[in-house]
Amino acid sequence: MNVLEVRDARVEFQSPGGVVRALDGVSLDVHESEIVAVVGESGCGKTTLARAVLGLQPLAAGTINLLGQSVDGVSAGVASKVGMVWQDPYASLNPKWKVSRAVAEAASVIGQSVNPSEIFKEVGLDDRFLDQYPHQRRGAQRERAGVGLPLEKKPPLVICDEPTAALDLSIRAQILNLLKDIQRSRRCSFLYISHDLMTVRFLADRVAVMYLGRIVEEGPTEAIFSSPRHPYTKALMDSAPTLDVLHHLPDALPGEIPDPRTRFEGCRFAGRCAFASELCATDPGRTEESSSDGAIRAFYCHHPLRDVEAIAVG
């Protein structure tokens, strides 16, 4: 049974001159005990998807189900099934409350009693932190507290929205290892949202790549990173700095990101793609591939990179 099922989700925002579709037909599954990462540049719809799963953002169309229960606004049912690790732990903790009160308040929403000491021990914090205010501890300790708060509900799904974005490299590694340990010990599922492709490759089992409100490629993490099919996926991977290529910035993609108010019939990346054809403007295309272990990857492209490269070599 899937922990999370998103089907053709659409979120719209009114803006001067038209409607922006922040999500435009997104479908995504998260299986039990699985970490699924959602990646893409700013404005592609990653956080909007997370807010929709939490019930904080209403859908214009489509459905979202958590363990078979439809998500329709914020409810105790949703709150008990989803934990949220926010990007800024200091903003997610009330500065006027001691941490112990924040823990108790979160548990009371779903009618549970918890032992804060046990939870904070799991994330590497001692009891002294419970009797302090958020500003009295360092950023790494607040981040651990931000990870610990949603665990008190023992949710089957945890959403992490850029949890390491504000941390230095050494602390980032600690938090990533902590998340992985928690996922293994609790057997919960993660929906992990990040710009940092290195952390995604380390943490995630599967990756979904978003561009302008749509998923353009999805599949096992190593398959996506080692052999991307969609041209946008490759451009995204090439933009991440690595030790293999020093003192060299990748070439920028041609053109500009289209106006998000545009009504797309075909591939929304076609205007920036070197391989686009007339067909791409009218039909996004969809292809599935199965590996020997049964894993499926899907991409929306009429000219996947493997085929284009084969033609170029021939």
Image: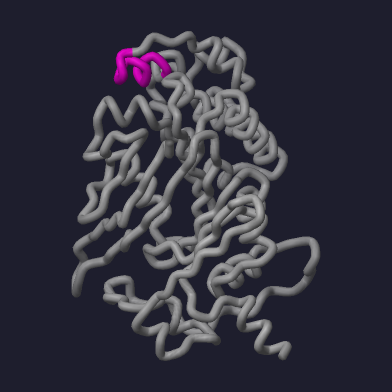
Q: Is residue 267 left or right of residue 39?
A: left
Quarter of the image that includes the C terminus? bottom right
Question: Which residue is depicted at the point 53% across and 16% down?
Answer: 119
Q: Is residue 16 left or right of residue 47?
A: left
Residue 87 visible here: no
- Viewer-closest of 214 and 311: 311
Residue 118 included in the magenta stretch of the image: no
Up the image or down, 306 lies above or below 104; here it is: below
Q: Is residue 150 left or right of residue 304?
A: left
Q: Quadrant of residue 68?
A: top left
- Viewer-closest of 96 and 20: 20
Quarter of the image that includes the N terminus? top left
Estimate the x, y position of residue 235 in percent, counting from the top left. 59, 72
Q: Is residue 152 left or right of residue 249?
A: left
Question: Which residue is depicted at the point 45% across and 39% down?
Answer: 159
Residue 239 visible here: yes
Estimate the x, y position of residue 34 in percent, counting from the top left. 54, 39
Q: Quadrant of residue 103?
A: top left
- Residues in magenta, as a range: 103-111
